[in-house]
Image (cartoon, helix red, strand yellow):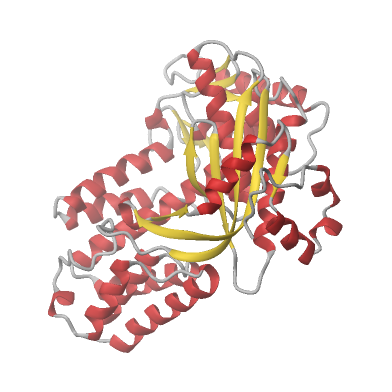
Amino acid sequence: MRGIGMWFRMLGPLEVVVDGRPVDLGGSKQRATLGLLLLQPGRVVPTSRLLTALWNEEETPVTARKILQNAVWGLRRRLSVLSEDGRDGVALSTRAPGYTLEVAPERIDLHLFRQMATEGRAHLASGAPEEAARHLESALKLWRGAVLSDLTEVGIVWPEVTTVQNARLDVLEDWFEAQLECGRHASVLGEIATLVENEPLRERACGQLMRALYRCGRQADALGVYRRLRASLVEDLGLEPSRELRLLHQAILEHDPALHAAQQPAVRIAAPAVVPDPPARRHVSIVLVRAGFDRPVGEPRETDLVLDEVDLRIRQEIESRGGTVVAALGTDVLGLFPGRPYATDHAERAVRTATAVCDAFARTPGSAVPGGTEVKAAVVTGEALVRRRGAEGGVTSLSVSGMLPHIAQTMLTQAPDGEVQICPATRKALARSAAWERHPELSGHQATHAGGASAA
């Protein structure tokens, strides 16, 4: 990223560098606007998404759109001056239903990071760990701190930022894998241990730490990593470790000679799970949200943008309250809130998510999202089958099955637009946690179940 021209740096504090010198970007709203546009270069970011991003959980002022317009005007003027000779091809344009930042991806450090990571992973998959380690290390060296750290310091909380931060951890684990395959278990041991200490539930990193410890002659410590992880998973999520990690644990117990080999296909945590873990019967709350339009949106391209915006807003509300999106089809999104032992807050968090989604679209009908978005939701609490599924890169996902999702679908068909249906078991859980008294806004929504369905 050295040389002549304009560069955008996001992997750390937000910076625009021209000919090697950082330039002034203006106030926090102007910087935040640029940051969000850079997360989606070349794509139209709807005005409603920008307004939500700039004010987060704060009450949006009546002058919000004017403030945003001023921020865009300031950025456009600044960028046009910096690239007035046209050599950088940077332009901030107004395009319905929002704005887009036209910039060559190779001028953004996040794009370079992803490109280098992809090359490194390709080398790792093809059995060239030395080349993989070199590319992955170059990708990691682009980071100067937490992504958009200057914005997060002033209270910015965006799901896109969390996604990028998690991508760094995934690449770091890829680099660990390459180092282990090169036989550098001793030199990388400390860095793996640091990651596991900071992210104790990342199973892939735990598996890598177990392998490194075992190769260093520390079998007891390797088994201790597994015991601590299993205790945390069972206590916090009610889940057992993944099949791959259980195989690795067994191999360490049996002093399997394959553990000392560079390649360990049988126990590599990076590999996708061939056989899904058996489902666990868990006490959970689920929220099913459906969005629709009260009038035509326009051309298919504009409709897709609107649907994408609605989906993003719903996912953001679910994930910001500790839920997990387990399914999405069309305009239906299913969020899962697993219950912790001896706790009832999962029902409250699910209901607060549902009401927040409905309220978010009700506050600005017909203007926040073009087309007039209508949203309704159902919340059901009870026992369901929760299954962990392996995914590429060692990442696991959750799915939920059983009668609970079916009950939520039945209830949703009877929920009026803009309202939330809650089952009796959810109402009971809210009463036990005194949620109605602490959050009186919850009682402003429907609190009945449909068709006699019960989740208790």
Quadrant in the picture for the C terminus:
bottom right
Looking at the picture, how far across and down is residue 212, in whole percent? 28, 75
Q: Nearer the viewer, residue 191 or 338?
A: 338
Where is residue 325 drawn, in percent x and y? 52, 47
In this picture, residue 332 sits left or right of residue 177: right
Q: In the rendered image, is residue 150 in sight?
A: no
Quarter of the image with the N terminus is: top left
In this picture, residue 69 sits left or right of residue 226:
right
Which residue occupies the extreme bottom position in the image? 220
From what the image shows, is residue 294 above or below residue 234? above
**Rendered view: 111 above or below 319:** above
Furthest-top residue in this view: 299
Name the foreground residue: 13 vs 277: 277
On the image, the x and y values in percent for residue 218 come to 29, 86
Total label count? Answer: 0
Q: Is residue 97 visible?
A: yes
Residue 322, picture quadrant: bottom right
- Residue 266 higher or lower than 328, as above or below: below
Nearer the observer, 392 or 384: 384
Q: Position of residue 182 (x, y in %)?
A: 18, 65
Q: Residue at x 41, y 56 (%)?
A: 169
Question: Is residue 224 depicted above or below 117 in this figure?
Answer: below
* Residue at horizontal 56 percent and vertical 36 percent from the top: 312
Point 82% across, 53% down: residue: 439
Task: Depth check: give the residue in front, 339 or 247.
Answer: 339
- When asked about the image quadrant of residue 112, the answer is top left
